[in-house]
Image (cartoon, rainbow, N blue to C red):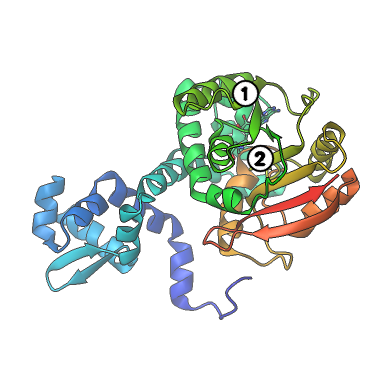
Amino acid sequence: MADASPLSTDGLVQILFGSSAFQMLNAGRNLGLFALLHRQPGLTAGEIGRELGLAERPVQILLLGTTALRLTTRQGEGYANAGLLDALFADGTWEIIEDLIEYEERIVRPAEVDFTQSLRENTNVGLRRIKGTGPDLYHRLSADPGLEQLFYRCMRSWSRLSNPVLVGKADLKGVRRVLDVGGGDGVNAIALARANPGVEFTVLDLPGTAEIARRRIAEHGLSDRISVRAADIFADTYPPGHDCVLFANQLVIWSPEENTSLLRKAYAALPDGGRVLVFNAMSDDSGDGPLYAALDNVYFATLPARSSTIYRWDQYEEWFAAAGFVKSERLPGGRWTPHGVISAVK
Ligand SMILES: C[S@@+](CC[C@H](N)C(=O)[O-])C[C@H]1O[C@@H](n2cnc3c(N)ncnc32)[C@H](O)[C@@H]1O
């Protein structure tokens, strides 16, 4: 649910200068400020400038920004990271956050200037910022190998951030083989395979991505349990022999009609009693939050495909029913990102 307190002028300032707030985080990351303060808390502005190779004026600008935003704190003359940042460094999450910052800067920012026009035209106008002629972001990535590499590195980090929810909530008891539809570089299949030693997986994705997945899975020594098949998830029939179909960060890309048709394909591929699992960010049934879903939706509205958006839980229930599934169950992640799993049975 959205924060119900009335908007203050401070709140308005944060919205008006929202991109500037992001730039403070981005610069602090790029210039190595947060990494420095994690190693050496308590440095003065002068010492920070010397360590980062920055003149006095830019150091003052940077520290004013990061401190006003509470990314850093000031005690006397010394500066330290916010406790949250140091905790993210300590548990290894900061390297994931660094990729997310880079994703926002290099992929989301250039396209999001087309947000208003995307709303007007009810389509992903920002796709014009990506080279190539493919119908969606994923088909265009193969036209730009540098961007493709960046995309899949960052996509892996988005998934690593949230897929403990998938691993913790997806009940694979009794499941023998999972079909991971649009499984990307295999990040979720790898995590699930590690947590569920008796289960095998097939990752389906476009040919270029399938190649990346094969390499990643081999690096993890899991090629005997995770196979990869290049396919178009709309045009091609799903391979038989799976008793669970997973859509991870997949049904946020397509329209309700396309999602219903993907779920019908899953239904047709499953035996009676087979399970479908949908894992991604969810928005609330009340349609007013959470903030993460609301703001991440600028990206979804502007870039990936014509109809991408962060749907409500109840929309998945509607599509499950239309595809013939029963016994749907909501499994909210209960973490700071609104990721959750929703499952149903054939
Ligand atoms: C948002 S990514 C999610 C990847 C992965 N499931 C994860 O959670 O990290 C969407 C994936 O769907 C794949 N995809 C998009 N359209 C596809 C299509 N028509 N056929 C096969 N895969 C497709 C993309 O290549 C991409 O890997």
Question: For the residue labelled by badge 1, is the local secondary structure a helix, a strand or a loop?
Answer: strand
Question: For the residue labelled by badge 2, is the local secondary structure a helix, a strand or a loop?
Answer: loop
Figure quadrant of residue 81: bottom left
User: Is 156 drawn above or below residue 220 in the view shown?
Assistant: below
Amino acid at pointer 1? Ser
Image region (quadrant) for ligand 1: top right
Q: Mark 1 points at which residue?
A: 227
Q: Nearer the viewer, residue 116 or 344?
A: 344
Q: Residue 138's x, y, as percent?
A: 61, 29
Q: Does the residue labelled 2 lie within 8 Å of ligand 1?
A: no
Q: Residue 9's x, y, as percent?
A: 46, 77
Q: Residue 103's x, y, as percent?
A: 46, 41
User: Is 310 drawn above or below residue 8 in the view shown?
Assistant: above
Mark 1 or mark 2, which is nearer the start of the sequence? 2
Figure quadrant of residue 59: bottom left
User: Is 159 drawn above or below residue 318 in the view shown?
Assistant: above
Q: Residue 196's x, y, as percent?
A: 59, 41
Amino acid at pointer 2? Asn
Q: Name the residue under label 2.
A: 124
Q: Residue at x 24, y 46 (%)?
A: 31
Q: Residue at x 49, y 78 (%)?
A: 8
In the rendered image, is residue 54 in sight? no
Figure quadrant of residue 303: top right
Q: Nearer the viewer, residue 212 or 53?
A: 212
Q: Residue at x 48, y 71 (%)?
A: 12
In the rendered image, is residue 205 in sight? yes
Number of marks present in the image shown: 2
